Amino acid sequence: MKKTVRQRITFAVKITVGISAALAVMIGTVILLYINGLITLNHPEKKYPVKGVDVSSYQGDIDWQVLSKDIDFAYIKATEGSSSFDSRFEYNWQQAQKTGIRTGAYHFFSFDSSGKTQAENFISTVEAVPDMLPPVIDIEFYADKQNHPPNREDVNAQLDILISQLEKHYGTKPVIYSTGAAYQIYLSGGYMDYDIWIRDIFREPSLPDGRKWTFWQYSEKGQLEGYSGDEHFIDLNVFCGSEEDFRRYGK
């Protein structure tokens, strides 16, 4: 017996609802697995074999001999703004250097402080050591800054001072770390002589001005052995180049 038009529509609706429900469950499962660090959206290790992490006091007590087994480099938070410093920096800086991996220090840029005093804070905290990676300036939004981003001209004026002071002191050009949103506002089309470290947890970065990134933070949900802080996850990064390229980098 042929189905009526109403029966066909009812059947189609049931199928659509069933498919939608199944998709919702699948998407929810993937999101839950990602939140708990059980899956990573990016897997760049084969293409980019040089792997690293960036750490701060949030990772707590780090056993660098253990952590270093899985990585080639580590960037360690040193300072923030004009007066703040990371409480674990001195320990991390000294212990990481005993492992054989390459290490570098980063500064969290403040939109509310002068470039001069931020440079003084970093320089007074980070002693230059042999084979260290170039210093990093981390530019990303905090508090209400994303909803009310400071003027580019004002930010760049202080950033230029900070860059100049660090470059003069350490004898190498700093790397600039940024999120996609901050890059678009403050860096796009400028600072072409400086290497970029970009954050993108969804896909390999494609910068809006066509330039190539040097470091890529591809995950904020990494889980490695060797730390026991309040933060259960660790940021994962890769270097754009071969192991030989990395050995020469920054020298």
Image (cartoon, grey):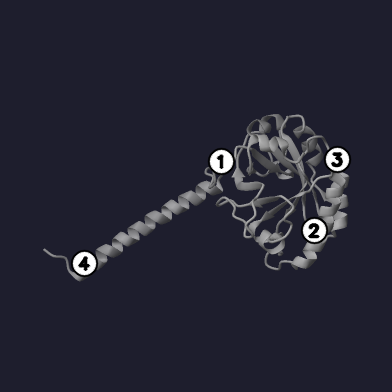
Label 3 environment density (alpha carbons within 10 Å; few <14, some 14–19, many ≥20): few
Q: Which mark is residue 159?
A: 2
Q: Quadrant of the N terminus?
A: bottom left
Query: Horizontally, is 103 left or right of 20 in the view?
Result: right
Query: Horizontally, is 121 left or right of 66 in the view?
Result: right
Residue 54's x, y, as percent?
A: 69, 43
Q: Secondary structure at mark 2?
A: helix
Which amino acid, mark 4?
Gln
- Callout 4–callout 1 Cβ contact below 8 Å: no
Q: Looking at the image, is mark 1 or mark 3 earlier in the sequence?
A: 1
Residue extending farthest bottom: 5
Pair 4/3: label in front: 3
Question: Residue placed at 75% from the left, 42% from the top?
Answer: 76
Q: Looking at the image, is mark 2 or mark 1 earlier in the sequence?
A: 1
Which amino acid, mark 2?
Leu
Which amino acid, mark 1?
Lys
Residue at the disc numbered 3: 127
Pair 4/2: label in front: 2
The quadrant where residue 105 appears: top right
Measured Cα–Cα span from mark 2 to mark 3: 21 Å
Question: Residue placed at 72% from the left, 37% from the top?
Answer: 248
Q: In this rendered view, identify the residue nearer to me: 84 or 128.
A: 128
Q: Which mark is residue 248?
A: none
